[in-house]
Image (cartoon, rainbow, N blue to C red):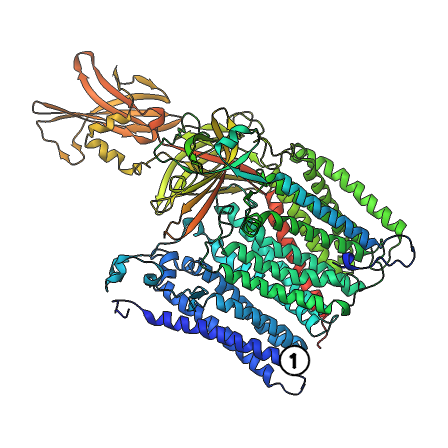
Amino acid sequence: MRFVFLQAVRIRYDTSMKKSSIFGLIVIGIAIAVIVVIYAGASTYGSFTDARKTESVLRVVGHLDKQKELYYDAAKDANYFSFYVKDSKGEECKVVFMGTEPQDFQKSEQIVLTGQMVGSEFHASEILMKCPSKYTKDKLDVTDVRAKSASI
Amino acid sequence: MNKAFQGEHLLPGHLGQFFVILSFGGALLSTLSYYFATTNKDALDSSWQRMGRWGFYINSLSIIGVCASLFYIVYNHYFEYHYAWSYTSKELPVYYLVSGFWNGQEGGFLLWTFWQAVLGNILIWRAKSWEKPVMTVVAFSQLWLASMLLGIEIFGAKIGSSPFLLLRKAIEAPIFSQPNYLSFIKDGQGMNPLLQNYWMVIHPPTLFLGLASVVVPFAYAFAGLWQKRYKEWITPAIPYALFACMILGTGVVMGSLWAYESLNFGGFWAWDPVENASIFPWLILVGGLHVLIVYKNSGHSYFTAVFLVLASFIMVLYQSFLARSGILGETSVHSFVDNGLFWHLVAFILVFLGLAIYLIVTRYKEMPISKKDEETYSREFWMFVGAIFLGLSCFHLVLVTSIPVWNRIFGTKVAPPTDLVSHYNIIQASFAMVITVLTGFSQFLKYKKTDTTKFFISTLVYLAVALLITVPVVYFSGLYKLHFVFQLVMLGCVYTLLVNGKILIDALKGKFKLAGSAVAHVGFGLMLAGAIIAAGTRGLVSVNESGTVAIAGFDKSAQGNKISGDSHENMMIYKNEPVKMGPYLVTYAGDSTSLPDHFYKIDYRRYDDKGKMIESFELKPKVQLSDKMGMTSSPDTKHYLTHDLYTHITALPQPKEPASADGQAAAVHGDENDDKNYDPPISHEIAIGDTIRFREGYMVLRALKKETAIQNIPITDSDVAIGAKIDIVSNNKNYSAEPVYMIRGKNVFDFSRTVDEAGLKLRLTKIIPEKNKVEITVYQQPENKKPWVVMRALDFPFINLLWSGTLIMILGFLLSIFRRNKEIKPV
């Protein structure tokens, strides 16, 4: 951009840098800050074993164990849904989601869970599902459900 | 394979495919002719230009032909075509058939190329001396769009994806070996229920018009550099840039209005990658627009103007790549699946990016870049700063949204930040704060040079007033509970509103030229303020205990380390049992079905302190249940001037019980299994006038009377049939039932009566003449067998500011278009 390319030519104050050059440096600074914030905030895809080792929130990729029970009893707690997921390394863990069963949940082929371990259960705040398409096998579509739904 | 298939209608498809190829040919002819017309030195020779026009006309007419053929196929339900089969079905009404038309990727391209053709024709008519170079660019872009629809194979590589693909070619199945396969395909797959909404009819055309119109300022900038007419392109490009910003902005907000009205994520913006991608070009072009005006007025910021205008179209191509290539598969809800166009889309971007970079590099030295430094107290400097901040905001969105792209390029496996929403909210709010403050105080500056003292006085006075207004706004709206950056944005919005309001008043007094920008800035400020308040202070209504629940993404703790407070947003309610939710008494009053929709009547009542009802209304959130799609829920919203009450169903008993209309009939036929649905029965010996109490109320035996007929069973003189008239009060609602006791010969029958609404079944089981009493057996449904729904209700305060702000901003753009249009001198 111009403030980067231009030489610092100053008419009135020979010693100071051109204003747009200073502004250019500020912009570059902000850009670097943005990158650092993203880099610091970026998470990784992990397994349940990784989740046990850390206190922080992470993403686990796996698939729903359809043999095991999906538990939801609206009469007891309308915000408690639990199920079992096998992560990509084959480890299975009980997952608790504070909400209702997401749409098309049982058809999902792959699940990305965002959350953390609480005791021996994985508490998910977000479930991202990859479902086989409603129509044909060669298509995929994805649904995203958040326990605390997003806005703005 | 030249097998004849019965019942296929191949003509419209062949015709459509012919038009697709013709549109490609027309665009090619037009591009080449306009190119030679531009480079031709002989000014009197207009033959190339004429050919370019004809090529473009052919292209435009062919596109209409393609649309007509595709619509004919969809309208007549020719399911031998993959497109018709995939996206429509026979039961869809005509206006959804229209939206089925742009449901698929090919339809989206078709819409885009259609609008671009319309714009091209306007340019042919109006661009005068700019026609040749500008139309070269537009026709070249048409060429690429046409290639996306070709659907032909060249050297084994598939070029484009045609909407006229036959079903039997799209999907491999044994059924297609039968010549009469069509007789087995009775109906199409239909449209996703979420898309069956009037917004789906108007949102895509608007959005695509916005995306298509970004090509015009790009083409002007491109032509300006190419033809070395460095300064002249700015003036005619400004109205088109304004138009593109206006329509694109409208399209994006329509999308969020659609999401808010009919999708169930409970909001109007979710920072989904596809949503983010749609505002990349908008942010860049709004920035570009401002520096275009800066250059026009002061001769500064030329490079930035060129850079941003060129980048806006690259962003259009990039967002199309993100949405259509399937690359967002793991992070987005509504991206398309790769149709085999991945590299085709990449090439589309790279070609235009390459040409733009080539022009910038080769023309850089000749650009009229001002060597003078801007004055610090000049409007142009701060408008330039604002444009750069819009660019930075876009830069951040691009970086995060493109994480799957970086993973693909660098072979990494980085996941987006875990608390993505608050990440976006906080960083974007920071940029928004800077931008609102800039749109405020730069109004006090003049181009070139301003009187400093006057400037500081007015800036600070307005800032002080804004602060005085913001403090109560933040306090009463509840914004103070959020991260401080949102309060700063609020301050920025109030400041912008005040300053631009003042400019607007001045404008009405005479300087009418300035009205456009002032109106647009007021609209922008209102829009942002509405978005922050509505999303940030959203209230949860479906909660038992009153209390505040932290809203994700707005928390004071900036660290996304912990999942903050489990917000129990869903509540279960039994039919006809009022539940207190926030200020309302909410009752699930019943359901009705109008296939494929099931409506759930949710009755809301509000009482004042004295127990007097001050408000009563009913919301009918909708659910569609199908094997294919599962449960699809759409909200219903009560709109007030200052807030909205939003309600949707999140869970239902499974499987869904049949509609209760025939409950009565089933009970008469004495289905013994039915008893399993009730708690163990309780028998009461009562006389006329006695009362029986049960969980939700009481019932009174009013009378015993001799029956003369029991539905379809004739009663003869030798039979004795007695009915017990019982009045029931359950949850303050009145019902009545009349169970019957009958003696026929030596057999005793009794006919129970069910009151589904109250979850009761009553039998008259004994008559005890000696005590003058009868025995009534009461069956009551256990709590969890009673019909129930799980619902979520949210309250969005001041969301109307968002929508009205958008309308005002559109109006401002419109005023500016009229003003800037007058400035074009015919060249």
Secondary structure beneath label 1: helix
Is residue A9 shown left or right of residue B469?
right
Is residue B797 shown left or right of residue B109?
right
Is residue B181 shown left or right of residue B378?
left
Instruction: Please rate how many residues cluster around mark 1, counting C-alpha atoms within 10 Å: few if below 14, some from 14 to 19, many from 20.
Output: few
Q: Is residue B496 in view from this perspective?
A: no
| Quadrant occupied by the C terminus of chain B | bottom right
Q: Residue at x 32, y 62 (%)?
A: B168
* Mark count: 1
Seen in the picture, residue B204 relative to B139 is either above or below; the reply is above
Q: Nearer the viewer, residue B382 or B25?
A: B25
Q: Residue at x 30, y 26 (%)?
A: B760
Q: Which residue is mark 1?
A: B39
| Mark 1: amino acid | Thr
Q: Position of residue B441 (x, y in %)?
A: 79, 50
Asked where in the image residue A18 lies, by quadrant, the reply is bottom right
Question: What chain is tagged by disc 1?
Answer: B
Q: Position of residue B523 (x, y in %)?
A: 67, 51
Q: Nearer the viewer, residue A5 or B634?
A: A5
Q: Nearer the viewer, residue B416 or B110?
A: B416
Q: Residue at x 46, y 46 (%)?
A: A142
Q: Nearer the viewer, residue B46 or B798?
A: B46
Seen in the picture, residue B286 relative to B608 is either above or below; the reply is below
Seen in the picture, residue B106 relative to B735 is either above or below; the reply is below
Q: Position of residue B320 (x, y in %)?
A: 54, 58
